[in-house]
Image (cartoon, rainbow, N blue to C red):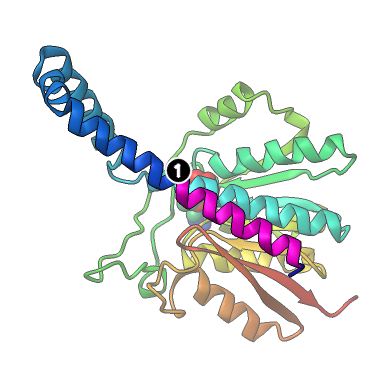
Amino acid sequence: MRPWLNSISRLRYFNMEQLLKKFFALLDKGVAKNGRAIVRVLQSVHGRWLMRIIFFLFRESVKQYDYSDFSAISFKFALQRALRFIVDNKIEGSYYEFGLFEGNSFLMALEESKKLSVQGYTLHCNGFDSFEGHPEPIGPLDESLSPGGVNKWRKGQYYCDYSKFVGRLDENNIAPDSYSLYEGFYNHTLTPDLQKQMNKAAIVHAACDLYSSTREVLEFIKPLLQQGTIVMFNSFYYGLGNPHVGESAALQEFLENNKDIQFIDYYNYSHMGKVFIVNKALS
Ligand SMILES: C[S@@+](CC[C@H](N)C(=O)[O-])C[C@H]1O[C@@H](n2cnc3c(N)ncnc32)[C@H](O)[C@@H]1O
């Protein structure tokens, strides 16, 4: 470090220490001189109310952490990161979300794509859901292995009525031509005919939790994948680290059957999500 910089930093450190010392000395003096007055104020009616308010605010601030907010915020950052990746690398195509529930993540994608369209980048959003909730889990591969071995996923879980879903998009002023919805269970909706009509995938968000559903999703998007497609899995770690159940089992099986496609580890998000970049022989 240059000598004059060195002396300035020492001076600043010295001043800060002196200032703190002075501050605590004044505080000590104040309490020593007005200690009884402070106690009297705290014992008065107003003082007691003041203490109650401070206690209430403290209790509220340490209340149980709202992890639904955490999941939403971390998904948003994960999505923004994915968008930055596809925009910077000029990866064209659409956004695909499989598993919509009440539309939290789909809405975020639509809001973000609205911002992108201002920059001249088009990202049409396709959403797929039964709007009847999860199908019947097929067995051990669909289990989430929650503590006690209880199968977390249930038939009908995450039910959301189609009209309620569309109503929510309308309330948020989403232009109807910016998205397409496909209603029904994947074994009916994800057909080869539909596959042929679809754009390449820029971002895929597999948010359907179950091995059986994710497997159908991966087969459907296979020809839509391109070099650099981002694939996000919402419940990748639901098997408590066991890679042989749920979404991670579906991906493993898919990669074993499709040796020409690689999923490159990119990043994790929220407490269960994982993101990959597709590496595929250029065709
Ligand atoms: C965890 S929720 C999706 C959460 C949503 N992305 C959000 O932001 O709140 C899972 C969704 O996947 C859908 N789903 C799962 N398997 C399906 C299948 N085989 N066919 C159609 N929808 C399915 C369920 O209906 C449910 O809405």
**Picture residue at 74% right of the left edge, 67% below the top:** 3
Disc 1 on helix, strand or loop?
helix
Q: Amino acid at mark 1?
A: Asp
Is 196 left or right of 39, judged from the image as shown? right
Residue at the top extreme? 45
Segment tinted magenta in the rendering: 3-18
**Picture residue at 82% right of the left edge, 58% below the top:** 200
One can see residue 188 in this view: no
The picture places residue 142, in percent across and down from the top left corner, at 41, 68
Is 257 left or right of 196, judged from the image as shown? left
Q: Is residue 61 above or below residue 191?
A: above
The picture places residue 179, in percent across and down from the top left corner, at 72, 38
The picture places residue 25, in percent across and down from the top left corner, at 32, 41
**Picture residue at 17% right of the left edge, 13% below the top:** 46
Q: Is residue 100 above or below residue 238?
A: above
The picture places residue 207, in percent across and down from the top left corner, at 54, 56
Q: Quadrant of residue 1?
A: bottom right
Q: Verify whether residue 194 appears in magenta.
A: no
Q: Nearer the viewer, residue 27 or 254?
A: 27
Is 67 left or right of 6, judged from the image as shown? left
The residue tagged 1 is 69
